Image (tube, grey):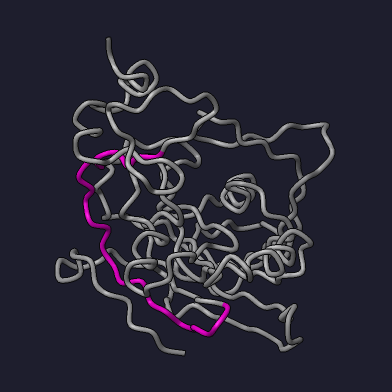
Amino acid sequence: MGHWLDQRLSEFIDVPSFLADGRIVYGSGVPVSGDDSYQPNTFVWFHRDLADETVVPGRIRIIHRDERLVVIDKPAFLSTIPRGRHVQQSVVVRLRAELGLPELSPLHRLDRVTSGVLILATEKRWRGCYQTLFQRGEITKTYRAVAPLRPGLQLPVTVRNHLVKQRGRMQAEVRPGEPANSESLIDLETELGGNSIYRLTPRTGRTHQLRMHMWGLGIPISGDPLYPSVQDVAIDDFSTPLQLLSSELRFRDPLDGSPRHFASERTLPLRPVGAAEQRSQPASPHS
């Protein structure tokens, strides 16, 4: 008769092999033995073998670090958190190892293809007070984006609508007639021939909000693989970065009351990373 774990775990891992190697453990860290009897309501833990991941090019630039916060300038194509096919190639996994901060966690998220300022808490004890600022809308966010110049478009303009992003669907959608749950201020900053740099100020934080609002104005962000249409882009194709940059974040620190202002060092238009930067580079802190 098989081990009591076989029925539940065999579809995910080779249970006998994992038991023999001590790779299945109880919450205490003690390895599960093949001779252990079944105990109801018992949690066990294991690490699956990870598939090989293509190294995401570009350096994670650290623009500020103190006791409570790490602020980075994220490159395009790097996930904020481990998920799906992006585990080791994520901000959290890479920086926890590089900085020796096992509790490092993001206070907000950027899409994998979005670049720029991202704030992380160094320890769990700091996370709640800063996340509350995001939840209450007390963080001033400024993004910049490259998109086509549309003659006749009156700017600045505030876009409000009801956005929904359903699990399993690539694109978000607008639901007309429902109360607005998203709001963005869009303004023209600089003309670049047939394109322009726009300054985007989101007042809410819905998934794909800025990308949807720009598309809705008839000026989809350059390099967007989802809007206006879904592009079949290989997971290791880093040739066309989305021209959307989390440019600045401002807030008053909830613990000491000091004004905080963090700005990206990147400039638009974002360019593909050269071959010399195709391998992972260690973060080098500076403030």
Whether residue 270 sits left or right of residue 176 in the image: it is left
Q: Is 11 positioned to the left or the right of 114 in the image? A: left
Q: In the image, residue 80 lies at what x, y percent?
A: 45, 57
Which quadrant is the N terminus positioned in? top left
In this view, the residue farthest toward the top is 1
Query: Magenta span covers which residues?
Result: 45-68
Residue 207 location, x and y as percent? 60, 46
Residue at x 43%, y 71% (from the top left corner) = 101
Quarter of the view holding residue 35 = top left
Left or right of 206? Residue 81 is left
Q: Is 116 rendered above or below residue 41? A: below
Residue at (74%, 60%) from the top-left corner?
203
Reply above or below: 147 against 52. Answer: below
Which percent across, then down, holds residue 54? 21, 51
- Total label count? 0
Q: Is residue 237 above or below residue 21?
A: below
Q: Is residue 223 magenta?
A: no
Give the residue at the far left of this rendering: 276
Q: Residue at x 51, y 71 (%)?
A: 117
Majority secondary structure of magenta residues: loop
Residue 185 is left or right of residue 272, and the answer is right
List x then y, in percent, for residue 8. 39, 20
| Point 64% across, 49% down: residue | 213
Q: Foreground: 253 or 235?
A: 253
